[in-house]
Amino acid sequence: MCGRYSLTSPGELVAEVFGLETAPALEPRYNIAPTQEAAVVRVLSPKDAAQLGRPDAGRRTLDLLRWGLIPSWADDPGIGNRMINARAETAAEKGAFRFPFERRRCLVATDGFYEWRREDGGKQPYRIRRADRRPFALAGLWDRWWQAPRQPVDSFTILTVDAAPGIAHIHDRMPALLPPEAFDAWLDPGRHDRPALEALLRPHGEELETDKVSKVVNDPANELAECVEPLAES
């Protein structure tokens, strides 16, 4: 699974990696947790853009969405608290994720995600990142929940796959990473070729490294640079 991650990279670098027209203003996020708003890259269909009165349909944009997907049909938005991850192997078949998989796919911007490994009777957090420390994309799905007179809520989930060999000793699942050459296909709301889309969702771990980090990250209230700093080897 993926229950916590970071995005500390400057907006200019995020724009470069994700092919954005303008650099977003981003504050460093060291400990992004479920129910919080986080940076997601998507391409809005004309219908989705029109609902919000936006002129940017068909273009890559970075938006802040709530982590924990609330299906458009949900009676209670609290259901999103249980929808932070979706298994890539079955997402296209599940009621909560079927429509988003078909038409509302997104890229979750990150520069490292956390997993926990049981060690010495406790759980030790690790941060998994690229060796070059550049931001990268996690495959995500988003949806819009809207019940008048409330404001619409756009939310997302992160797709997970079996862990790559270099990560499996920490956890048996990991978020699905997407390389830049897959961005166009994944983001296109008009692309509905399920087998081709599912083929993009496989373990990628060749460029990843792991750092043991402080247990300060265990508390989602701790939004501190200490969360991402590797522990010194004893």
Image (cartoon, rainbow, N blue to C red):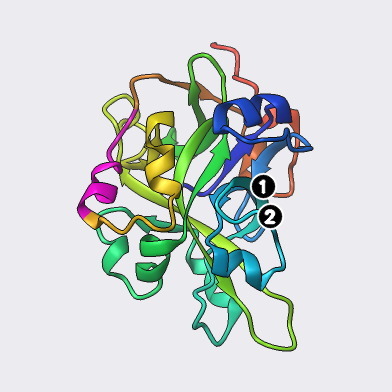
Residue on which the image places disc 1: 219
> Which residue range is magenta in the image?
195-204
Find out whether residue 24 is within the magenta segment: no
Q: Position of residue 96 (x, y in %)?
A: 40, 73
Q: Position of residue 232 (x, y in %)?
A: 60, 13
Q: Amino acid at mark 1?
A: Asp
**Residue 132 in view of the camera:** yes
Residue on which the image places disc 2: 37
Q: Amino acid at mark 2?
A: Glu
Alpha carbon distance from label 1 to label 2: 17 Å
Camera-side residue of 3 and 140: 140
Where is 56 relative to 112, above or below?
below
Kindly state the secondary structure of the residue where label 1 is placed: loop
Label tally:
2
Q: Position of residue 77 (x, y in %)?
A: 60, 78
Where is 218 relative to 73, above or below?
above
Task: Identify the residue at horizontal 46%, vertical 51% (top origin).
Answer: 140
Q: Is residue 38 left or right of residue 27?
A: left
Q: Nearer the viewer, mark 1 or mark 2?
A: 2
Task: Identify the residue at horizontal 35%, vertical 55% (top origin).
Answer: 191
Q: Position of residue 179 (x, y in %)?
A: 40, 30
Which corner quadrant holds the C terminus?
Answer: top right
Camera-side residue of 107 and 112: 107
Task: Give the residue at the far left of this rendering.
Answer: 195
Q: Earlier in the sequence, mark 1 or mark 2?
A: 2
Q: Quadrant of residue 149?
A: bottom right
Find out whether residue 202 is within the magenta segment: yes
Where is 229 relative to 78, above or below?
above
Q: Residues within 10 Å of mark 1 (few under 14, many from 20)?
A: few
